[in-house]
Amino acid sequence: MNALSTAKRVAGICLAAATVFGLTACGAAGSASGEQTTTVTIGVNNAYKPFDYLNENGDLDGYEIAVLKAVDDALPDYKFDYKPLDFQNIIVSLDSGKVDVASCVFTVNAERKQKYNLTEPYHLYLPAYIYVSNNSKASIKGIEDLAGKKVAATQGTDVANTLEEFNKKNPDKKIDLVYANWSGEQLATALESGAVDATYSDPVSFDLGQLKGKAKKVGEPIQESETSFLVGKKDTKLAKALDEGLKKISDDGTLSKLSQQYLGDDYTKSVA
């Protein structure tokens, strides 16, 4: 989907009434330049391990939290406060001005680019692969090989949208998308029983879920999702500052190290 003051991967509120360029001014501490430190309220989720979650000590932890903390350290004129929220309320809070930044492994798409400022460089690139049962004898290496096959899918995901687009363009090679709110256990059972022929996942989610050991990855990535922090469209000053901080921790290797620490590999560079 950083740890922090009252919550410095989601958190805190500091004088939400007084805002400058959409940011909350907090006059307690001074920056290295002598100016007042600007407090930024970031909406995060606390139940999406390994990206944003509460650790055994009850503190916010995870890859995105650690990334945000590193960006905060790189920006002496800013102080990040974290506000834990349910996933569905993070965007709502950003739209209503209750938080300045939204963080929860938000993938980059055209709609979000139009509505928000998206931070760059992107801090996470997650490739999506096709997974089949360990016992599967089907020759599946790419999307075209899924024609006529039943594929477990989740409505609204980027990969599901890609597969739907494939069906529209290839009506004679349609993929049978089986939509449900699949749990890892349900997916494993469906694959093993033959109720579905395949599903899709990114390697991080796969390794942490109940499919590990029960399914295998086939072929090359069918899609790659880039993730970004979301900032209000008018908050260009904040967006630019976050971009500067992300570039600093990308250039000095911190971003790569955090990915390896929390995700088990370096997912900070595109594989496309």
Image (cartoon, rainbow, N blue to C red):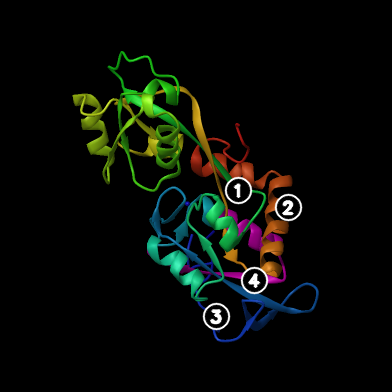
On the image, the x and y values in percent for residue 221 come to 50, 28
Mark 1 lies on residue: 123
Which disc is residue 248 wearing?
2
**Label 3 – label 4 distance at C-alpha:** 20 Å
Foreground disc of the pair 1, 3: 1
Q: Residues within 10 Å of mark 4 (few under 14, many from 20)?
A: few
For the point 63% across and 38% down, the residue is: 269
Q: Amino acid at mark 3?
A: Cys
- 256 versus 133 height, above or below: below
Per the rendered image, the range of residues in magenta is 66-86
User: Dot 1: few (<14), some (14–19), or many (≥20) neighbours within 10 Å?
Assistant: many
Which residue position is annotated with label 4?
234
| Amino acid type, residue under disc 1 in the picture | His
Q: Residues within 10 Å of mark 2 (few under 14, many from 20)?
A: some
Kind of residue sitting beneath label 2: Lys
Q: Amino acid at mark 4?
A: Lys
**Quarter of the image containing the C terminus?**
top right
Residue 205 against residue 98 in the figure, above or below: above
